[in-house]
Amino acid sequence: MAVILLADDSPTHTALMRSLLEEASHVVHCVGDGLQLMQALDETVPDLVVTDLRMPEMNGMQVVQEIAARYSTIPTVVVTSPGSENLAVDALALGAANFVPKNSLRVLLDHVVCQTLQLSQADRLFDQLSGKLLHPEFSMTLSNHLSSIRPAVTYFIQSLAAAKCMDRTQRIRVATAVVSALFNAICFGNLEVSEEEAVITQILSGEESGHQELRELANQATYRDRHVSLKVSIGEHDTRVLVSHNGPGRSMRTIPAPGTPESFELEQCRGLMLITSVMDDVKFQSDYSEVVMIKQHA
């Protein structure tokens, strides 16, 4: 259970989001605009902020900036309306940890919120560390089971926290980008799943049938020898992450172009937008079987 501060000026969308979050056993406090949200933050510290981007008094973009500057331990998830997709890109650049299109609330809201909270909780374990992990480097080979992503990324964000790189919000953002890269490499690279297949929506919605179908696919002879590689180097000035797969699929989709309104409900494009918005430099191999992501620490 987490405490979530929710800001949206639409009573309809507020009621829907509150219902979805409370179904997941979260405690939800609602406000109607960004100014009320910032006033609420002066009185209580939630585990997560969920905010619409278009609001009166103080919009979501200003909220993201203020929280990043004043409350760097609180991650923010922004909610985007049709027609405001470009604002989501800007919000990610300013410090939002993730985004959810309003058209996909029922599919994505709980998934994104839970993922962000899990990363935040993993990061907090190193709050009391008095020392510092010096220049860690590691490599992992992951199977094509989605269950392998969480422990790998937990180890990654805890390595960042132990090395005292960046603040918590930035570490969560970088870890979120790595989650997206691994998800795309497994699903679309090695397992060659099509974005249009129902299994993707089922997985994001938390339906066990989707996870079971993907596990059965990963265990088939065609796919079981394929794997994903994760290589990480955390230096003094930057963090470098390489994610690669050895399947024939593409971990990047270029049509529709990521960031366009048509792409926002496609998880492969949404993941790519997270990667390119959060990281300072992103380089794909020509066949999109490998991506190198670099994040500057300052």
Image (cartoon, grey):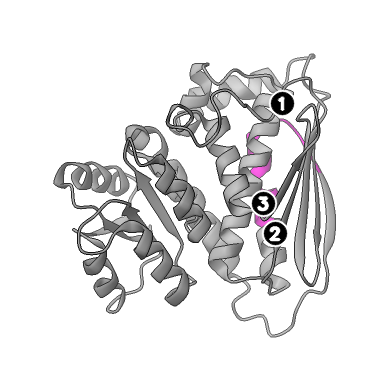
Q: Is residue 284 magenta?
A: no
Residue under pointer 1: 189
Is 284 placed left or right of 4 in the picture? right
Residue under pointer 3: 153
Q: Quadrant of residue 223?
A: top right
Is 15 placed left or right of 123 in the picture? left
The mark that comes first in sequence, 3 or 1, is 3
Q: Is residue 144 magenta?
A: yes
Residue under pointer 2: 295
Q: CA distance from mark 1 to mark 2?
A: 24 Å
Q: Which region is colored magenta?
A: 141-155
Residue 8 position, x and y percent, is 24, 52
Q: Report the quarter where the C terminus lies.
A: bottom right
Predominant secondary structure, magenta span: helix
The mark that comes first in sequence, 1 or 2, is 1
Label 2 crowd (10 A; few <14 / some 14-19 / many >=20): many
Q: CA distance from mark 3 to mark 1?
A: 19 Å
Is 86 placed left or right of 190 in the picture? left
Label 3 crowd (10 A; few <14 / some 14-19 / many >=20): many
The mark that comes first in sequence, 2 or 3, is 3
